[in-house]
Image (tube, rainbow, N blue to C red):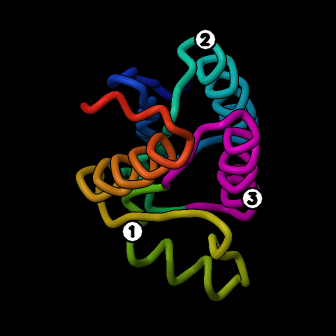
């Protein structure tokens, strides 16, 4: 089942509704990369709140998404990891230590706002908004 991706300003929000098959995960990667380019997105939120089981392929794929989008100039944050999913990932040795996570969508948006604001100021692109 395709993952819906919403555009909110300069951000994309992918809301994963159920456990992803390998094909779904690969499609999500492709769809996000196309939309990052199309909309010149500065940030991506991948909301996995509805996921209660995550296999190692899906976890590695989320990390790959974050790395790919960062190479395109967009920050990525994974939000909504359930406690049991986080526990299982740690037990399997799968971590997101090199990517950003947040408790929920609100916290993820706040992190992206801080991160992209800092980047605009550093790059001299702050238009006073």
Instruction: Say which residue label 3 marks.
Output: 60
> Hey, which residue is sitting farthest front in the picture?
124
Specify the principal SS of the magenta part.
Answer: helix
Q: Secondary structure at mark 2?
A: helix
Q: Which mark is residue 38?
A: 2
The N terminus: image quadrant: top right
Residue 66 falls within the magenta-colored stretch: yes
The C terminus: image quadrant: top left
Q: Secondary structure at mark 1?
A: loop
Q: What is the crowding at mark 1: few (fewer than 14 residues within 10 Å), some, or many (at least 20)?
A: some
| Residue found at x 67% / y 60% | 59
Residue 76 falls within the magenta-colored stretch: yes
Depth check, front residue: 77 or 2: 77
Q: Position of residue 33 (x, y in %)?
A: 69, 26
| Residue found at x 52% / y 26% | 41
Instruction: Say which residue label 1 marks.
Output: 82
Q: CA distance from mark 3 to mark 2?
A: 25 Å
Q: CA distance from mark 3 to mark 1?
A: 17 Å
Decide: is 53 above or below 10. below
Q: Position of residue 110 (x, y in %)?
A: 28, 53
Are circles 3 and 2 on residues that touch, CB within 8 Å? Answer: no
Residue range (magenta):
54-77
Label whose residue precedes the other's in the sequence (2 or 1): 2
Q: Secondary structure at mark 3?
A: helix
| Residue found at x 75% / y 34% | 26
Label whose residue precedes the other's in the sequence (3 or 1): 3
């Amino acid at each position: 089942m395709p993952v819906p991706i919403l555009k909110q300003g300069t951000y994309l929000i992918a809301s994963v509704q159920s456990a992803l098959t390998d094909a779904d995960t690969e499609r999500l990667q492709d769809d996000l990369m196309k939309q990052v380019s199309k909309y010149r997105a500065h940030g991506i939120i991948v909301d996995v709140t509805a996921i209660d089981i995550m296999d190692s392929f899906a976890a590695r794929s989320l990390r790959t998404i974050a790395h790919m989008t960062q190479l395109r100039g967009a920050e990525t944050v994974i939000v909504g990891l359930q406690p049991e999913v986080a526990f299982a990932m740690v037990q399997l040795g799968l971590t997101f230590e090199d990517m950003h996570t947040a408790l929920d969508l609100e916290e993820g948006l706040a992190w992206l706002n801080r991160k992209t604001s800092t980047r605009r100021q550093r790059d001299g692109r702050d238009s006073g908004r």
